Amino acid sequence: MPSAPPPKLDPASLAASPLFAGLSTAAVEEAADLGRVRRVPRDHVLFEQGAPADALHLVLAGRLRVARGTDAGERQVLRFVGPGLPAGVLALLGADQHYPATASAAGGDAVVLSWEGAALRRLAERHPALLANAMRALSGRAQEAHERLAEMAAEPVERRLARALLRLVRDAADGAGGAAAAAPTAAPIRLAVSRQELADMAGTTLATASRVLSRWRRAGVLGGAPGRVRVEVREPATLARLAEGGGR
């Protein structure tokens, strides 16, 4: 059965994305006109690690899993990119750039807005603020990569899992223009992520991740049905203490 066509794009829905920070309404509308809405079926690859970075993408719906293959043949899940967040920002830096990781649709179909070729060049030339926004995104991801390397080398699994969940909470807030961060702390923060995906992000096994997450669920830090794709973060402050090595 053929996949459903991508939904019609509403340019106003793009304004909250950090990719368009500082751009006028007219500039955002132009960007929407220049882009192409695409549906990426579940588990299909949007771009491959090592391929030329020739297209910029903005997630409109669903999620992308960004993972990097190692020399040992293992896969490291670096992050999940949700609605409102960009992927492939190296494409804005010009020729001779290559994607450092592979992006694929996770948990279901994803919908992205893509710019490539002449549309990408025009976007970069007419709106230099996009380049500044892209550099901020790259800087943040580089810092996150350094932090994760340090965690993998020295931190216990519980802290790595807590930090992985907090990164997902932060990314959800960023994609919503900070709205999630401003929500009442009593409201659960719902994340579309499985235990296996969290285990991959934390560099541990599914069995170990499941034991820790189940313990947090019993303690009320997390909600949601055990083993389901969606996780509810009920106590972000407690999770933050766990990420720093403190107890409940």
Image (cartoon, grey):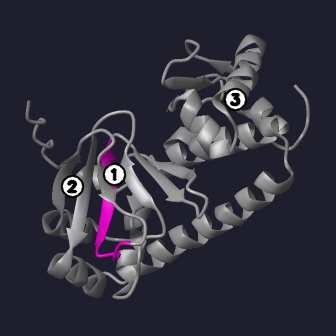
User: Where in the figure is residue 111, as x and y percent of width and height?
Assistant: 25, 46
| Spatial separation of the CA atoms under disc 2 and disc 1 | 13 Å
**Dominant secondary structure, magenta:** strand
Circles 3 and 1: CB distance less than 8 Å?
A: no
Magenta range is 51-61
User: Where in the figure is residue 162, as x and y percent of width and height?
Assistant: 73, 37
Residue drawn at 46 percent across, 72 percent down: 133
Residue 107 lies in magenta, yes or no? no
Quarter assignment of residue 33: bottom left
Label 2 amino acid? Pro
Residue 143 shows in the view: yes
* Residue bearing mark 2: 11
Judge from the rendering whether residue 30 lies leftward or rightward of residue 245; answer left or right: left
* Residue bearing mark 1: 59
Question: Looking at the picture, does residue 185 appear above or below residue 166?
Answer: above
Q: Using the image as rendered, state which of residue 137 and residue 64 is in the foreground.
A: 64
Secondary element at image label 3 = helix
Q: Earlier in the sequence, mark 2 or mark 3?
A: 2
* Residue bearing mark 3: 209
Secondary element at image label 1 = strand
Label 1 amino acid? Val
- Quadrant housing the N terminus: top left
Neighbour class for label 1 at 10 Å: few (<14), some, many (≥20)?
many
User: Where in the figure is residue 115, as x and y percent of width and height?
Assistant: 23, 69
Q: Which of the two discs, 2 and 1, sits closer to the camera?
A: 1
Circles 2 and 1: CB distance less than 8 Å?
A: no
